[in-house]
């Protein structure tokens, strides 16, 4: 163990981008001893003024705490930051909140295990302004024992959900949910481009979109049931009908001088399933085209 003499419950936070700074602020608010490090100098000034300890090096930060939290740019930056201090991390808990792929999280979990480091991968389902508020949600996977011991700490940031021992599980849920989010925002931007071309404000369009999209999410459980059962022959909008609707939207986009790119993406999935002979089946069948990869 490398943490003899280190204050119990102490946290080192590596990475002080917008999210990292807020994570550190909430820990300070809750009374945790916090050491901070960032590759670019100067981002820790306000945190140090509030009581955080500044570390000049990664090694200094890691050896000052029992729990090390990373919130960095990507998987490559995590490796670049942590690999030189692997021996110093032994006996400590590493919580990586960097957005990475499931396999990258699994790699880090294996690397940590080989060095006697307890590892949890985490996914932040919130914007920086939401951290510490009831709507903030964070997902974790990896060591169940570490999750149990640190749950009180995690709940400083938001609700904490444990997704199992697979180190990549939290990342998988994170990126799957973000896929839906980014697709939704792209669809909103496309619709806004259509209506603003006719002099309607994006704000007015946002009010209408929010009502419709909120109602549509209520259909998710029914769609999920169809997908899980694999039976697309029941009632619902057929692929043929959907293709016609998408063609109409694409033509309307062109008429307004707007790129039909988001619609063409969905249309390609629909047409592929029609060409495979499933035109009369439910439009939820595009799931099968996505699965076919």
Image (cartoon, rainbow, N blue to C red):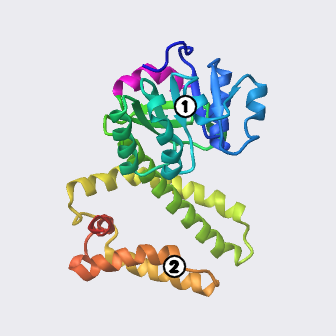
Q: Position of residue 254 (x, y in %)?
A: 58, 86
Query: What residue sits 51% from the left and 22% below the top?
Result: 66
The residue tagged 1 is 158
Predominant secondary structure, magenta span: helix
- What are the residue bounds of the magenta stretch? 144-158
Q: Position of residue 79 (x, y in %)?
A: 48, 46
> Is residue 203 positioned above or below 200 on the image?
above
Quadrant for the C terminus, please.
bottom left
> Is residue 245 positioned above or below 112 on the image?
below
| Cα distance between the residues tagged 1 and 2 | 40 Å
> Is residue 84 positioned above or below 203 on the image?
above
Instruction: Tell me where residue 205 sits by quadrant.
Output: bottom right
> Where residue 212 is drawn, which disc sits there?
none
Quadrant for the N terminus, please.
top left
Callout 1: SS? loop
> Where residue 249 is drawn, which disc sits there?
2
Left or right of 239 in this view: 39? right
Q: Would you say residue 103 sits in the magenta stretch?
A: no
Q: Earlier in the sequence, mark 1 or mark 2?
A: 1
Q: Position of residue 245 (x, y in %)?
A: 44, 78
Residue 134 appearing in the image: no
Q: Position of residue 104 (x, y in %)?
A: 40, 49
Of the pair 41 and 274, the residue shown nearer to us: 41
Instruction: Tell me where residue 239 sits by quadrant.
Output: bottom left
Query: What residue sits 21% from the left and 80% below the top?
Result: 277
């Amino acid at each position: 163990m490398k943490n003899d003499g280190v204050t119990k419950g102490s946290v080192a936070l590596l990475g002080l981008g917008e999210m990292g700074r807020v994570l550190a602020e909430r820990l300070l608010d809750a009374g945790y001893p916090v050491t901070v490090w960032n590759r670019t100098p100067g981002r820790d000034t306000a945190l140090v003024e509030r009581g955080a300890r500044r570390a000049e090096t990664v090694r200094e930060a890691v050896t000052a705490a029992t729990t090390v939290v990373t919130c960095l740019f990507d998987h490559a930056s995590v490796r670049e930051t942590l690999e030189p201090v692997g021996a110093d991390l032994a006996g400590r808990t590493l919580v990586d909140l960097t957005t990475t792929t499931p396999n990258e999280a699994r790699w880090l979990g294996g690397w940590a295990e080989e060095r006697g480091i307890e590892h949890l991968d985490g996914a932040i389902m919130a914007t920086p302004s939401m951290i510490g508020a009831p709507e903030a949600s964070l997902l974790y996977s990896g060591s169940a024992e570490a999750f149990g011991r640190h749950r009180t700490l995690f709940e400083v940031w938001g609700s904490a959900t444990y997704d199992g021992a697979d180190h990549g599980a939290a990342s998988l849920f994170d990126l799957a949910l973000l896929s839906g989010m980014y697709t939704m925002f792209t669809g909103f931007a496309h619709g806004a481009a259509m209506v603003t071309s006719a002099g309607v404000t994006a704000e007015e369009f946002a009010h209408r979109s929010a009502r419709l999209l909120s109602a549509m999410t209520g259909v998710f459980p029914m769609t999920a049931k169809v997908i899980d059962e694999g039976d697309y022959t029941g009632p619902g909008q057929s692929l043929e009908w959907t293709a016609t609707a998408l063609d109409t939207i694409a033509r309307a986009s062109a008429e307004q001088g707007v790129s039909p790119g988001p619609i063409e993406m969905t249309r390609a999935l629909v047409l592929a399933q029609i060409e495979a002979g499933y035109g009369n089946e439910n439009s939820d069948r595009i799931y099968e085209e996505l699965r076919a990869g």
